[in-house]
Image (tube, rainbow, N blue to C red):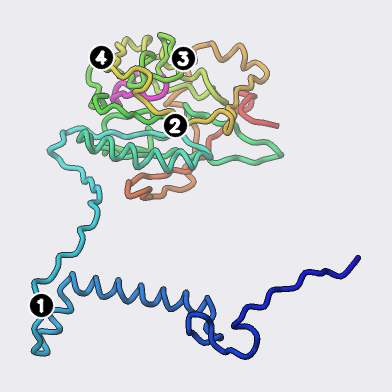
Amino acid sequence: MFPSRRKAAQLPWEDGRSRLMPSGLPRKCSVFHLFVACLLLGFLSLLWLQLSCSGDVARAARGQGQETPGPSRACPPEPPREHWEEDESWGPHRLAVLVPFRERFEELLVFVPHMHRFLSKKKIQHHIYVLNQVDHFSFGTLHRFNRAALINAGFLESGNSTDYIAMHDVDLLPLNEELDYGFPEAGPFHVASPELHPLYHYKTYVGGILLLSKQHYQLCNGMSNRFWGWGREDDEFYRRIKGAGLQLFRPSGITTGYKTFHHLHDPAWRKRDQKRIAAQKQEQFKVDREGGLSTVKYRVDSRTALSVGGAPCTVLNILLDCDKAATPWCTFS
């Protein structure tokens, strides 16, 4: 290869005869030094502004017998922070928001602050329970997600401080403040009705968001624990509601249609477990007349109080028990 014929241009102040840069600064004063000096000047300016607007400078000057020209300036107001505290004047009822959950942290970071703000604006006393299914690894197998069993466990763990529940998907956010989250005294209230849910529109759908008094949930014996994987547990619970002689109610007068909720789920990013293993294909359409709230088997591994974006919640790490003799489809091999 031939040696390069290009020669670095020599600037006038780099010929060794001049020790000054064009700006008149010494050559050793690099761009970094100038940058640090600017940062220092900026910090001192902000400090002076804060002291002067708060009146500290004026008070110090008066203490030394000096006069300060003009009145002290008011500091710029801080942006208001939303802070909600439950009040007994909101009513006698308290809602347990039961959120079945596993590995959807991005959605949870949005859900908890949104729901706390939404319910507080409506003056609904509430507490959010994140029902986190802890994975089982034994002999190379993994337990599948069981939304219904988690709700049964969350119902039992919510205690006596609440008297009604919301079975609430973590990826479904209510946007219309006209939606009713009040105590469903007359019967189960399906907030995410087929006329409003962005995806599911069949008449017997009761998923997404469903409110029940604890008395009515016990009357149904909760949900079936046999549904491992995604789907069908809501359809079976609809039949339980009817079998218990309860009337199902849904919103009326909501004009926002399918824009009533924001659906966070991205199917391209999070694949649903829709596999049907062994006899699960036939069993998924049957009514479970024996199992439910009274037969759920689980253990709470830990209970942690958290604040997500200033909104309080309780995370329950729940280990579900799987009877492979009764439901051999509860694990992945």
Give the CA separation, mark 4 to mark 2: 23 Å
The disc at residue 171 is 2
Circle 2 — which element? loop
Report the residue at 41% width, 73% height from top. 39
Which residue is label 3 attached to?
235
Question: Which residues lie in the magenta part?
Answer: 207-219
Give the CA separation, mark 3 to mark 2: 19 Å
Which residue is label 4 attached to?
252
Residue 103 within the magenta-colored segment of the rendering? no
Give the CA separation, mark 3 to mark 4: 22 Å
Pick whichever of labels 4 and 1 is earlier in the sequence. 1
Front tag of 1 and 2: 1
Mark 1 surroundings within 10 Å by alpha-carbon count, few (fewer than 14), some (14 through 19), many (20 or more) = few
Which residue is label 1 attached to?
69
Circle 4 — which element? loop
Give the CA separation, mark 1 to mark 2: 58 Å
Picture quarter with the N terminus: bottom right
Position of residue 228 measured from the top left corner of the image (x, y, whole percent)? 56, 26
Circle 3 — which element? helix
Q: Amino acid at mark 3?
A: Asp
Report the residue at 64% width, 30% height from top. 331
Pick whichever of labels 1 and 3 is earlier in the sequence. 1
Pick whichever of labels 1 and 2 is earlier in the sequence. 1
Picture quarter with the C terminus: top right
